[in-house]
Image (cartoon, grey):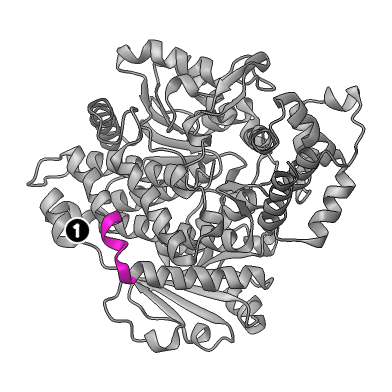
Amino acid sequence: MQSTAGLAGEEMPTPVTEAANPITENIDVASPLDIVSLLHKCDQEIFEGWNEYKSLYDADVLATLDKLITVAASVIKNPSTGAVVLSGCGTSGRIGFITTRTFNAKLSELSRLPCFKYLIAGRDKALFTSQEAPEDDPQCGVEMLKEATAGKKQVLFIGITCGLSAPFVGGQLQYCLDNLDVFTPVVLGFNPTHLARNNPIEKWDSTFLQVVNKMEEMKASSKVFILNPVVGPEPITGSSRMKSGSATKILLETIFAGATLSVLPVERPWQTEPFLRCYQAVCDHIYTKENIRNIAQIVELAGNSLRSNGSIYYVGEDTLGIMGMIDASECPPTYGSSLSDVRGFLDQGYKAFRNNDGDLSLLGKHFQISFNDMKKDILPFVKPSDLVIYLSQDGKIDETVTKCHCKKALISFASNSPTRDMMDVEVGISLPKDKLVSLIGEEAVDHFLMLFEEISLKWICNAITTGAHVLKGKVFQNIMVDLKVSNNKLFHRAIGIIQRFSGLSTEQSRDYLLQSIYNTDSLTENVRSYNISSHIETATPLSQVVPRALLSAILHCSVSESHKLLEKEPVIQRVISQTLSGLQNNK
């Protein structure tokens, strides 16, 4: 297993969430059809388990879920004095948001008071664009948690951090541990606890590993929980928006579906494992040969759009539209893409979005999310190289989309779309409803069918934008080499990428990264001594920081020389591949 730098510079085993997945090691040269098939194989690992680690169906995981269902049900019964708070950064925070929105709506539908709240590092701006600095601020997380839970006497707090690493969440968990008379703290992630991040954190006197170790010691109290099944490495290394994001959604929904049904007079007793197996049945069912072929066609259209400097636009209603928006928001930090490369729009905009801070459209065009905004600002100006992907429950499409002069795709849950002939390609999703009913009963399916629709759409949208960026050359092997160096996690990931392909030490790889960030070949000790947050602040607005550093490290050349190489061959995958091949041939 690879290693990364830990506390005081010692080499640590690579966390599972940061490891390379052997299934996708050649995804950068795969066809669209093969890309979709490879991603499906990786998604299956969510349910099949990985190596010797505990899986989703492990007895310890199921027991923890059952205990959390009981705690959540207690809060649902006493909403005036209690709250369920979901907190995370980036994808984790966005999954927390949509889960909160879904279950508050369900409680309102059942004439119960909503009791779910979400916190996301960077507040609601982070639902649309990456707001990385707050992710590294434990005190910011604590202050937001205090604000959200003022006056509450019983709080179930679930801190979501896929790699067991986010300082924003770590500070909140520490605060909960210090106030167990009110809080029931849960850490949700997908690494074994001994692989939690142990790097020093600015503005904090602890590491995430130390917090997790304290939680391990306190677990026996039944007041502290660690929920960390291992679902295996991501298909694109470190891209936790994919398997980890899906597993987060699955686990949260299982807890809260169980809690909601437990306070209702349903005939069929709740069983946790069958509910989890519903998601596995859906995963297997949506990847039919026909669907894989049609998804691959959309991947190819999306890849062509990005390679031609076009854009991909999602538009949909309710939670389907939100899933498209979440997928779009994750592309810039993952692939170094612009905010305009992939965008999402929602029918009825903020009225349907129902976020904490309300309408943010005055912040700029990337916060203008309504379909009306799209019809006014996007559709009249689309190019043949653009792609509009319509996400529809019933297969009906607004005529302004059908008439626009670009490529068009439809993803719907209708068996027969009335506008099918107007689309370049359609993916029709049918859920295995009979199988779901056999697993959890008709009442549960009626209440929560939309959860299975959402996860279906998440898997498909993730495949489309992942495949599109692979085809654009943003991935080398299965490494996202053009990521934004915009937070502590990505700073260390960038060093690991340079080290992996150059064979240099952690310290040497760090120097090459800093040379690229500061555009210099002569690092001073003063620059080396800056806090990581200072490096991140400088790096965040820059493009191609990691590719420049990687080429300089491999070729032992100047930053300006590596920049010239990238100008000659803008497809990053190709220039790195050619560089490494040249070195092999010269040996």
Left-right relation of 539 to 80: right
User: Residue 378: which quarter of the image?
Assistant: bottom right
Look at mark 1 in the image and give the residue it sits on.
Answer: 446
Decide whether residue 251 is among the magenta residues. no
Left-right relation of 493 to 233: right
Left-right relation of 279 to 185: left
391 or 510, nearer to the observer:
510
Residue at the (11%, 53%) spot, across then down: 438
Asked if residue 5 shows in the view, the reply is yes
Amino acid type at image mark 1? Asp
Decide whether residue 285 is among the magenta residues. yes
Residue at the (64%, 59%) spot, across then down: 473
Q: Which residues are magenta?
A: 283-290
Q: Main secondary structure of the magenta part?
A: helix
**Numbered disc total:** 1
Find the residue positioned furthest to the top. Answer: 217
Residue at the (60%, 15%) spot, across then down: 206
Asked if residue 371 shows in the view, the reply is no
Estimate the x, y position of residue 97 in percent, counting from the top left: 46, 47
Q: How packed is label 1: few (under 14 Cα within 10 Å), some, or many (20 or more)? A: few
